[in-house]
Image (spheres, grey):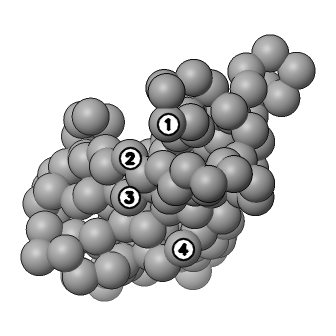
Amino acid sequence: MYLGRYKLGEWVPLSVQCRDASGDAVDPDSAPTVTVYDGDFASVVSGKTLPAKDVSNRTGMFEIEGRLASGFSEGVHHALFQWSAGSHSGAELKRFRVVGGGHQDGAYTAMQHYKRPQASHIVGHLDSGVLEFRKNPRTSG
């Protein structure tokens, strides 16, 4: 299954519907895991445990959002989900593409401009929680 195209810094929803051998939704013995591989099948994220989603309405549904940080590069990535329910071991493979643009720290969620006598300053808050400070000094002519 193809999940779409994303830029560095964006969040990718990684979800799986656990099923038994006959294809019926099932609660696994323990939370499923996801491992993300790059195009050369080198592990980028290893064995991340997924939390349950919508427990009261969806049996066996698990989801986590993964942020595309510094370990990711442009190209196709594969997410391998694995779980076990009784004697059945299940797996599902999904893929997504990381495209050019974006930044590993994400996009600005807030920004403030401060003008001071010596320079103008910008403080920005990014998706990743990073605070970024920028300074634009005046030039003398």
Question: Which of the labelled discs sits on residue 80, or is there none?
Answer: 3
Q: Is residue 59 left or right of residue 45?
A: right
The secondary element bearing badge 3 is classed as strand
Q: Which amino acid does label 1 sit on?
A: Ala
Q: Is residue 40 left or right of residue 13?
A: left
Observer-nearest residue: 138 or 100?
Answer: 100
Mark found first going from the N terminus, 4 or 2: 4
Against 71, residue 76 (above or below) is above
Residue 101 x/y as whole percent: 21, 55
Foreground: disc 4 or disc 2: 2
Question: Which of the labelled discs sits on residue 47, or is there none?
Answer: 4
Q: Which amino acid does label 3 sit on?
A: Leu
Question: Which of the labelled discs sits on residue 21, or is there none?
Answer: 1
Mark found first going from the N terminus, 2 or 1: 1
The secondary element bearing badge 2 is classed as strand
What's the distance in space between the residues labelled 4 and 2, CA to CA?
14 Å
